[in-house]
Amino acid sequence: MRPLLAAYVALSFLAGRKAEDRCGGPPAPAEPALSASSPRLSAEETHSAHMPEHLRCDACRAIAFQIREHLGKAESKRSPSRKAGAELRESEYLEALEKSCSQSWDNYGVLEVNGAKRLAGPGLLSQEPLSVMVTGGPWPGRLHKMCHSYVGDLGEERLYRAHRSGPATLEELLCRGAKGRPAKSLQNEL
């Protein structure tokens, strides 16, 4: 019994010694404090019905991403009897484009990076590892209107052909138009 008691006391002493080393030593260096704040939105960014000019490129890229995602998903769901790589039927790509524009767009919002406001969400580059993104509010409605405007202005078939040519072609068509200028958008007229 005595050897067992001696072993217990020795182990208790060592365990107490290790606890002292962890707790009694100098404190670990403090982690730098991280902070982030919400972007300060202008009256136009807060109340306007259309997408502010400085966010249109980001919005266009988000719309191109969503159109690619929805058309790609529709293409992957083809029946097995159709050969791989076959084009969607008109009704299929019309439905996919409608879904892409009519989605909720709730995953998109605005954040501030180095003093500049940027749209953020799926398909857009992450600009800051720690930032506050303001979602909801006017952003989903603006993206919804812009998407439907692009589809109406450019036409479903043209958008699908651009998608079939590759992601860069679709983004080029939406964001710079056929002549290198931004595609006409009715959003400012709405």
Image (cartoon, rainbow, N blue to C red):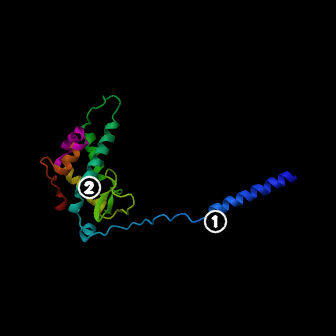
- Residue 131 is situated, as x and y percent measured from the top left of the image, at 38, 62
Which residue is identified by label 1?
A: 24
Q: Quadrant of the C terminus?
A: bottom left
Query: Which residues are the magenta region?
Result: 154-168
Q: Residue lying furthest bottom in this view?
A: 43
Name the residue at 31% across, 37% down: 75
Tell me which amino acid carries mark 2.
Answer: Asp
Looking at the picture, how far across and down is residue 116, in whole percent?
A: 27, 63
Provide the residue designation for mark 2.
58
State which quadrant residue 159 falls in. top left
Question: How many angstroms separate mark 2 from mark 1 (CA)?
Answer: 53 Å
Of marks 2 and 1, the one in the foreground: 1
Write the residue at 77% across / 56% down: 10
Residue in view at x 79 percent, y 57 percent: 9
Residue 33 on image: x %, y %: 45, 66
Are circles 2 and 1 on residues that touch, CB within 8 Å? no
**Type of residue at label 1?**
Gly
160 is within the stretch colored magenta: yes
Work out whether residue 28 or residue 64 is closer to the camera in this orientation and state it: 28
Q: Residues within 10 Å of mark 1 (few under 14, many from 20)?
A: few
**171 or 78: nearer the eye?**
171
Whether residue 127 is situated above or below residue 72 in the rendered picture: below
Residue 158 position (above or below residue 140): above
